[in-house]
Image (cartoon, helix red, strand yellow):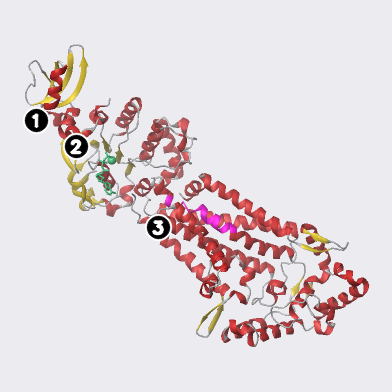
Amino acid sequence: MTRYEIKKLFSTAGSKLALLLLLAILLYTAFSMIHDMSCPGPEGDMLQGLEAAAFMRQVQQDYTGLMDEAMLRRAVEENARLNALYGDNAMWYKTAFAPVRDLMSWTFVPAYRDFDYSVIDRLSPGEAAGLYERRVALIRDYLQTGAGAALYSRSEAAYILRRMGALKAPAAVGYTKGWDTLIQGSGLMLILASPVLAYLVSGLFSQERALRADALFFSSRHGRKKAVAAKVKAGLLTVSGLYLLLELTWAVLVLSLLGTEGGGCSVQANLFSWRSGLYNLSFFEAWLLHLACGMIGVLFLALLTMLVSAAFDSTPLAAATAFLPMLLTVFISASSLSVLNRLLYWLPEGLFLLRDELSFEAGFLQLGSAVWPMLPVLMVFYGVLCLALPPCLYQLYRRKQPR
Amino acid sequence: MELNLSNVTKNFKGLTAVDRVSCTFGPGVYGLLGVNGAGKTTLMRMLCTLLRPSAGSIELDGQDIFSLGGAYRARLGYLPQDFGFYPDLTVRDYLLYISSIKGLRPATARQRSGELMELTGLQKAAGRKMKRLSGGMKRRVGITQALLNDPEILILDEPTAGLDPGERIRFRNLLSEIARDRLVLLSTHIVSDVEYIAGQILLMKDGRIAASGTVEGLTSRMPLGVWRCVVPHRQAEELLRRYKVANIRAAAEGTELRILAERAPVSGAEPEPPTLEDLFLYTFGGEGGKDHDKI
Ligand SMILES: Nc1ncnc2c1ncn2[C@@H]1O[C@H](COP(=O)(O)OP(=O)(O)OP(=O)(O)O)[C@@H](O)[C@H]1O
Ligand SMILES: [Mg+2]
């Protein structure tokens, strides 16, 4: 039963088009992510794309391992040596420790949001060694006396500082372009691909009526029970199967192009998580987390679409629903109403953007004095919906009155 | 096996589509005759558990079919009037899909659909997409799917609609072949479809069963006689106004008429044995449209 339901889903021209679209999204993401990569090369020119990745991969081996005092001192000393040697042209030789340097540029600054590219030139090795302490101090100032004081409640601020204090120091660093691109890229890919995946199942229920096949369906032996369950199962299998296929293809593609090393490096020692990350995670763990979040988000969107398909017997309406959260996200981001902006934290899109969700800027849920960051909240919220919707869908459709 | 309807009624917002229908069906072929809107489809949809009666009950061997649910539907084959299908599936996949929701095991399903495709002459079309079939072929697929689970109760709602005369005759032959030991209920407004194969005829009018019985029984009970006469054209017009006329044919000597009347309408009119078509005309008068004249 389920097998033929899936066959039915894929038999239409629309779904074949959707599959092509998924492939196009995959290739587009790969192209744009890799194209955007660049770094200063040894010959005094900017390297682009795969060439840049290969170069970083090669030279950053010297700065792989725990980013401890010794490594921080070494980076500052090496920086000074290169400055003395090459003067104004020194920037072309610093790619090896650029990740470490960038963390300093984000940390030894007056306020949370500042960035100072040249801070490493003025730091002594001893000062640089205090990188982790300085980070905590920066956040504390931001939350207690800086701009953050107005944005976060006392409990939230206390929570952030507690989590920050618990971050592993020293953190493992190294060349992580492969894993970083894997996670970031698949998030962007899912923003585009999730509505397409949900679109694939938009006709699962409504087509029966549109094709006037519902009378036969419901007058068959299993029409009010098993055949309905098979439909729900077919929808979930199609979406989750294609999702995993998409993710694994992406992973193989990216890691084979950019390298598999760095899976054990700390996410918190990377720019996107350095000043606001709340979690001790390696890149590999973060990828697994991303896979789980993505699965929840994609399934939720598909279930919502299927629910509309079953409830209103309209494929166009269901297909529109598939794109609704994406449009909402764009619409709310563009508006400046703060009420709407609070809603933004709750949209399922967050589940796709793991890099953003690791940060405390993704918001909190506060009940009384208890505080939870949005990532687990979203996972539980949409996870529960994913568990609750299939039975609803089943009960809804098996009671349908054919026309 | 006995399907028992008692006072089955269906109301749609102020309209009574089926009005207190009571009857009992056993194995055999039943022809449900009626004009458009008589309530045939509504009655059949209730027999397929798609609609619940507003009043009355339908029981199979004493058990309500709606509480039997899947167990009842397992014994049912149904061809809806507007038979919908999945345009992009092949005939074979379509039949296998329907087999699966009818609860057939995959091996049985393959064997059964193979046999039936042979019976209905569909083998050559097995790999073709449904949307590429002709209307007659689609009907054949419709009939084939109804037979997949070897149903004891077969409900066919206008199975011959849109078929050419040759297909229609083939269908009749097929039906007499498969009808053995089954309850077959067949709706149509084409009298010749059921005249020879249906053991029992039910005439449905305005939601009620107006008359039922065998063809002979029904026609012998008809209170009017059937007369054949040949008259000049001028007189024919007058007779048309006064009597129910079953058939008109222009002949060399004048107009040949087949008239329903108590007594001979003109001198020289010869009595004829009444047919089911005459009865149809008698029951439904002129409202039957032109469809019953075909073939
Ligand atoms: N779902 C419905 N809602 C409202 N009225 C309906 C519905 N289904 C049927 N009817 C009405 O009930 C009456 C009987 O319709 P039905 O389809 O049973 O007739 P039928 O004998 O099958 O006619 P036909 O020969 O045209 O198929 C019609 O007047 C029709 O308009
Ligand atoms: Mg009908």
Q: Viewed as shown, does residue B220 lie left or right of B199?
A: left
Looking at the picture, does residue B110 appear above or below residue A109?
above
Looking at the rendered image, the disc whose residue lies closer to the viewer, 2 or 3, is 3
- Which residue type carries mark 2? Leu
Q: Is residue B154 above or below residue A18?
A: above
| Badge 3: chain ID | A
Which is nearer the eye, A191 or B134? A191
Q: Which residues are magenta?
A: A192-206
Residue closest to the far top: B253
Q: Earlier in the sequence, mark 1 or mark 2?
A: 2
In the image shown, does B265 or A62 lie closer to the viewer? Answer: B265
| A198 magenta-colored | yes
Q: Dividing the picture into quarters, in which one does residue A260 lie? A: bottom right
Q: At x 80% / y 71%, what residue is drawn?
A: A98
Q: Chain of mark 1?
A: B
Q: Amino acid at mark 3?
A: Ala
Dividing the image into four quarters, tell me where ligand 1 lies.
top left
Q: Are marks 1 and 3 in contact (CB under 8 Å)?
A: no
Residue A307, picture quadrant: bottom left
Q: Percent from the top left, x then y, of residue A244? A: 60, 57
What is the number of the mark on residue B223? 1
> How far apart in space, not on screen, are marks 1 and 2 (Cα)?
16 Å
Q: Magenta span: helix, strand or loop, mainly?
A: helix
Q: Which residue is mark 3?
A: A311
